């Protein structure tokens, strides 16, 4: 858990340098169908992890800074993913989210 929190801090403080990484994560999120409204839940969990790892050292100021930084990076993800969802939807035969599909199998017995 400590490592995950540290890694998140690395991403947050180094947004520009991590652009290719952020693009790749967004592609992954797009493939899975992550929604913008899921970001606050993950943010709360991250803040709780920071509190758990830092213990007494987690002052209000530190938690607030993490909250702000998370807001910043999640905005970046959300807008990138919105763009990817729109692109996918506009492809020939594309759609957004889930779609009902019917699979037909044809068996030929000799
Ligand atoms: C700023 C916030 C977030 C960061 C920094 C982040 C980071 C990452 C990273 C690094 C990966 C692995 C990408 C790869 O395989 O190359 C990933 C995958 C994933 N993320 Fe996020 N993520 C964030 C928000 C979210 C949210 C809001 C959800 C929704 C619940 C989510 C769900 C997932 C899932 C399901 C995967 C795939 C896991 C797997 O392959 O087993 N993430 N994310």
Image (spheres, helix red, strand yellow):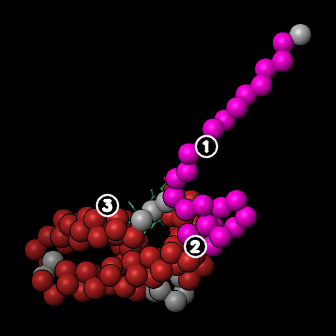
Tell me residue 31's x, y (percent): 56, 59
Could one spot residue 87 in this view of the protein? yes
Q: Which label number is shown at residue 1?
A: 3
Disc 2 or disc 1, which is closer to the eye? 1
Using the image, determine if residue 49 lies above or below residue 74: above
Mark seen at residue 30: none
Q: Residue at x 84, y 12 (%)?
A: 109
Q: Quadrant of residue 3?
A: bottom left
Residue to which mark 2 is pinned: 86
Res. 72 image quadrant: bottom left
**Which segment did they paint magenta?**
84-109
**At 70% from the left edge and 59% from the top edge, which residue is drawn?**
93
Q: Residue at x 77, y 25 (%)?
A: 106
Describe the element under mark 3 as helix, strand or loop.
Answer: loop
Side of 95 relative to 2 (left or right): right
Q: Mark on residue 101?
A: 1
Answer yes or no: is residue 11 visible: no
> Could you tell me which quadrant the C terminus lies in?
top right
Alpha-carbon span between mark 2 and mark 3: 34 Å
């Amino acid at each position: 858990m400590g490592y995950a929190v540290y890694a998140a801090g690395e991403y947050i403080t180094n947004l520009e340098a991590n652009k290719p990484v952020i693009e790749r994560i967004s592609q992954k999120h797009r493939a899975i169908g992550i929604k913008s409204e899921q970001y606050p839940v993950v943010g709360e969990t991250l803040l709780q992890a920071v509190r758990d790892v830092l213990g007494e050292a987690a002052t209000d100021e530190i938690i607030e800074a993490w909250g702000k930084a998370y807001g910043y990076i999640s905005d970046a993800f959300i807008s990138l993913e919105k763009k990817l969802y729109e692109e996918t939807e506009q492809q020939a035969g594309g759609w957004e989210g889930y779609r009902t599909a019917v699979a037909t199998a044809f068996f030929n017995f000799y």
